[in-house]
Image (cartoon, rainbow, N blue to C red):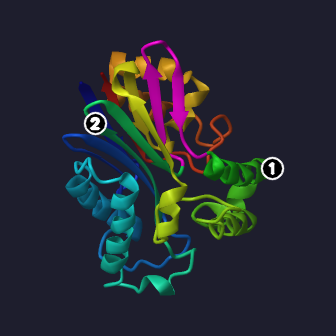
Amino acid sequence: MITEAYTHSIKAANEDIYGITHYAAFVMDGASALTNNNFTPAENDVVWMVKWWERYLIANLDELERPLEDIIEKGIIAFNEAFAIYKPVEQLSKLEQVSSSLAIIRIHPMHFECYVLGDVEISLKRKDGVLEILTDERIKCLDAQVIELMARNSEREKSCVFKDFTEEEWSLLKKNRMKMNTEEGYYILSHDVTAVFKGIHKVYPREILESCLISSDGLSPLDRFYQRSALMDEIKNIGIHALVDKLRAIENDDKEKAVLKRLKTHDDATAIFMEF
């Protein structure tokens, strides 16, 4: 099996992370709190979160006899205990909570296991040419509401109040964040153990698979230029690093976000690519 992995951020602190063990691999795409509070000693709380989970997943994912939901559920309990050193979890509002999308694959002797919680993606190309993408679209739908609002106001940059958002945009972002880990909104890795059982969990025979791409939402602008199968072929040809360089060039040419229609010009971008 051939594996390549890469993560890149324009920011000083990358809120994405990836990990590879003997039998598993994962990608996390962190989401910052919607307040100025910072409780942990890291650059920000979401960086602290994804680094904590990196250590935990690397230590536990190769226990193939353990169900993934059990590993993640016990991880949330341990994570909450660790976070409580700095701030009791029960005192956090949803606007103060950090969260992260999570994608995991595990390679068993006879099958290939996939788990997705949030809007990270696992793209699977089968030997017969069939392509399947595992992801939760609900976060993208909520973000689209804000993006549409941004597109209506050509003078919006003159009235930004917080993190390059206007008061109206910021209000909608907060309204959507309050839907975190509810049926009316979306499910994601945070402090709530019930979210674990809302993830996408599928198993495939190993022999049917040709390649797999695990990617954070930061790569999604490339969907405007590549069908997913072609994107995976491009990674095979030039590598993830070169592809992310292409992405950054496209983003730099679209600083107004008119073409890519994103919440921000640049997002952290992370991918793991495997060929079988």
Q: Residue furthest top?
A: 128
Find residue 174 and report its horizontal and vertical position in percent.
66, 69
Residue at 65% over, 70% down: 178
Residue 251 coordinates in the image, percent (x, y): 53, 37
Query: Which quarter of the figure is the C terminus placed in?
Result: top left
Residue 227 covered by magenta stretch: no
Q: Which stretch appears magenta?
A: 119-136
Pointer 2 local density, CA inside 10 Å: few below 14, some 14–19, many at least 20: some
Report the Cα–Cα distance between label 1 and label 2. Answer: 49 Å
Write down the residue under mark 2: 108
Q: Please give the name of the residue rendered at 36% of the width and 34% of the height, measured from the top-left corner.
A: 112
Please name the amino acid that badge 1 sits on: Arg
- Front position in the image: 236 or 41: 236
Q: Is residue 86 above or below residue 9?
A: below
Total marks placed = 2
* Earlier-in-chain disc, 1 versus 2: 2
**SS at badge 2:** loop
Q: Amino acid at mark 2?
A: His
- Return the residue at label 1: 152
- Residue 211 percent coordinates (x, y): 38, 23
